[in-house]
Image: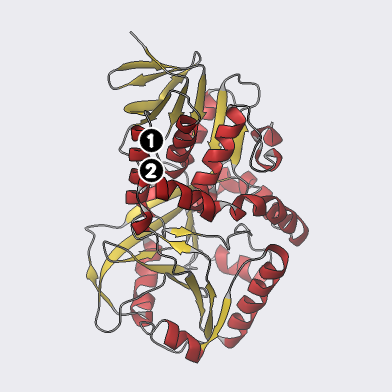
Amino acid sequence: MSQRFDIIVLGAGMVGVSVAVHLQQRGRAVALVDRRPPGSETSMGNAGLIQREGVVPYGFPRDVRTLLRYASNTAPELRYHLRDLPALLPFLYAYWRNSSPRRHLRIAERYAPLIAHCLDEHRALATAAGALELLRPAGWMRVFRSPRAWQQGVAEAGDWQRRWGVAFEALDAAALQRAEPALRGHLAGAVRYSDAVPCSDPQALVQAYAAHFVQLGGTLLQGEASSLREGWTVDGAQGPLQAPDVVIALGPWAQPLTRRLGLRLPLAVKRGYHMHYASGEGPALSHPVLDAEVGYLLAPMRRGIRLTTGAELARLDAAPTPRQLEQVEPLARELASLGPRLDAQPWMGQRPCTPDMLPLLGRAPRQGGLWLAHGHAHHGFTLGPVSGRLLAELLCGQQPLLDPAPFDPARFA
């Protein structure tokens, strides 16, 4: 016999858990379904930043010099699998077009209202879940090796401040040394984004939100999302689950399922790797730090110092190739004192990306009772709670917190 619910949410990452919490808060009977425990995939291995400053999505480079450097497939911030490029070319072309200055600015203007609520919505969930100790109001830094790059970074941050109220501090070399004495080498300066909030354990935060969902009366179940069929029915570990509405919040694994259901929504993945290190000698790192001219980030975590790499373009099921990690680790050891590796092997995660850099949030086109909540690219951890609230308001027929039109999946129909 089937278990019946008002809504089934597929995917227990940051986005799916947040959707489930907000629906349960609104009196719906919700089943949150995943094959693994909450926060076990992409939500576990990110840099742990709630990026209030992240108002401009990561665009595709347009200048010839950078494109030629990327074509060599040796850049530390971007690698690709050559055999997968033909299949990725339509996506990459659309991504490149949308990254023109005019289009990119328009996209940022649509994205800004969503980002503007990220801190308030995270704090609300973290407070309710008793997880505020995982959040540290420390901000994070982009550090620059050359004066020219630092000046460009400061100018960019100033533009974002004027347009969207992004708070920042420009730190010259001396101020950077005072603010982050753990850093070594000849650095020109930094931009510190003071409103951003680092998290010391991203998976633990997702799990705290999931535990809050259960405390609210929600049902957390193991099941196989790929079994979804019209009706809407999903095979759970203890039997079939049914609901009139279902939310697909599967991150990079959404596309195989939505395609089987007849939807042709453009989605690609940017893969990334991480490794943890023991702290070395000297002062401990107190901020997450992006080595902006190289393309990796160091973040202090509960487990140790986490090094996260740039992006790798490949198909969803391609084997891991952590070349970027091997390439940047020596540079990271020059920047900060890192001890031995703490993980047996590099972790790999996959970020789900749309070509217009905006997430898919809303009712699926031509599918009654089917809702989508994925495609957040680099900001799924940042945007989970506000996306969860927005989707819950739409599904429940409430006045939405902000205009949902820019994120409507029907824009690709």
Q: How is the image coloured?
A: secondary structure
Quadrant assignment, res 168? bottom right
- Crowd class of label 2 (few under 14; some 14 to 19; many from 20; radius 10 Å): many
- Residue type at mark 1? Phe
- Residue type at mark 2? Tyr
Taking the spot 72% from the left edge, 55% from the top edge, the residue there is 109
Q: Nearer the viewer, residue 139 or 154?
A: 139
Q: Between marks 1 and 2, how big is the CA–CA gap?
A: 6 Å
309 relative to 53 in the view: left or right: left
Provide residue 301's location: percent of width, then percent of height.
32, 63
Q: Which label sits on residue 209?
A: 2
365 relative to 245 in the view: left or right: right
Whether residue 376 appears in this view of the structure is yes
Image vertical order of residue 227 relative to residue 160, above or below: above
Q: Residue furthest top?
A: 1
Image vertical order of residue 84 relative to residue 146, above or below: above
Residue that carries the numbered disc 1 in the rendered image: 213
Taking the spot 52% from the left edge, 84% from the top edge, the residue there is 189
Quadrant assignment, res 11? top left
Image vertical order of residue 58 relative to residue 143, above or below: above
Image vertical order of residue 96 relative to residue 395, above or below: below
Screen quadrant of the C terminus: top right
Screen quadrant of the N terminus: top left
Provide residue 229's location: percent of width, then percent of height.
47, 17
Do the residues under discs 1 and 2 have CB atoms within 8 angstroms? yes
Provide residue 92's location: percent of width, then percent of height.
62, 50
